[in-house]
Amino acid sequence: MSVCAVVVAYHPDIAALRKLSDNLHAQGATVIVVDNTPPQSARVPRPALDARWLSQGGNSGIASAHNRGIEAALAAGHAHVLLMDQDSQPAADMLARLLAAEQALLAAGQHVAAVAPVFEEPRQRVSSHFIRLQGWRIRKVHCRHADEHVAADYVISSGCLIRAETLREVGPMEDALFIDYVDIEWGLRALSRGYRSFGVCAARMLHELGEAPAGLPFSRRKRYPVHSPLRHYYHFRNALLLYRRDYVPIAWKFNDGWRLLLKFGFYSLMTPPRLAHFRMMLLGVWHGLRGRAGALRAE
């Protein structure tokens, strides 16, 4: 089963990107790098990697970059696509464990959307969980043992393995979202068409979330990923855009909306520059309510 890894790059750390490419090759994957770095801002020449390099000519967004790589992978006849971020590093056996889990799930009669590893955030040293709507509540589901396959509503894009036939059936990522909620939208769309994503507890990966995490002043243990004000614009706008979709469950909208409200308060009060975060999140809400999509342009 041939696998093509699609790695999205944006101002990449060349040493880390080379390490990732070598890692994926060692696991048997063909590698395509889709570069979102604007040409005029690139400070280093294209690195010598054993990978096909596709330049977007600028920042086209994560969804568009994924779709460019997916299209190239499918055109080359690959049976699977493995989506990867430049700041992820899979364990040496991650791909083999994902493929084995997928085959076991298919043999059990599951309609598999994607399989994905458990990732560890190296700065927080915590393992990820998976998200599943149960009744009227969104639950965080943690792995109980290594052999478990956790049913999820969606999985994060980095590290997720998708069959070519599933991509043809469910469709590509949604370009108009640009960045953020792209993996959530695809997972929920797949779920509405009878496909389920799964977390593979035996598969592992290192993955950084955002910038340095922040926490509440009275709690040193609980930390939250922090992104730029611009990224928070997309986060809030795209959440509102998804709430308009009829294939997104009503209970999911209410639960995610409540969490979004809490995030608005936290990032407005706890993450400098507070006013910039507040303004960009508010603009994202306004544009989401208006149904505005695509890249944010200067007005």
Image: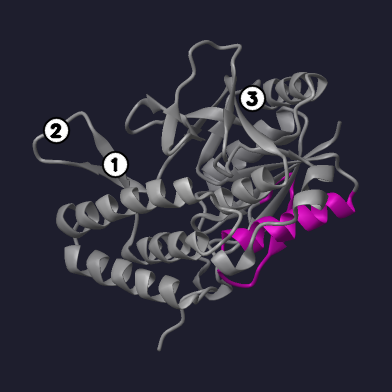
Q: Residue furthest left?
A: 218
Q: Which residue is mark 1?
A: 224
- Structural crowding at the residue carrying mark 1, measured as other residues with C-alpha within 10 Å and reported as few (<14), some (14–19) or many (≥20): some
Q: Amino acid at mark 1?
A: Tyr
Q: Which residue is mark 2?
A: 219
Examine the rendered structure and indicate whether residue 129 appears above or below residue 160: above
Quadrant where the image shows the N terminus: top right
Gap between marks 3 and 1 measured at Cα: 26 Å
Q: Amino acid at mark 3?
A: Met
Q: Amino acid at mark 2?
A: Ser
**Closer to the camera: disc 2 or disc 3?**
2
What secondary structure is marked by label 1?
Answer: strand
What secondary structure is marked by label 2?
Answer: loop
Look at 74% across and 22% down and name the residue there.
105
Gap between marks 1 and 2 measured at Cα: 11 Å
Sequence-wise, the earlier of marks 2 and 3 is: 3
Look at 26% across and 57% down and name the residue there.
264
Q: Give the number of callouts.
A: 3
Q: Is residue 25 left or right of residue 75?
A: left
Look at 43% across and 71% down and name the residue there.
288
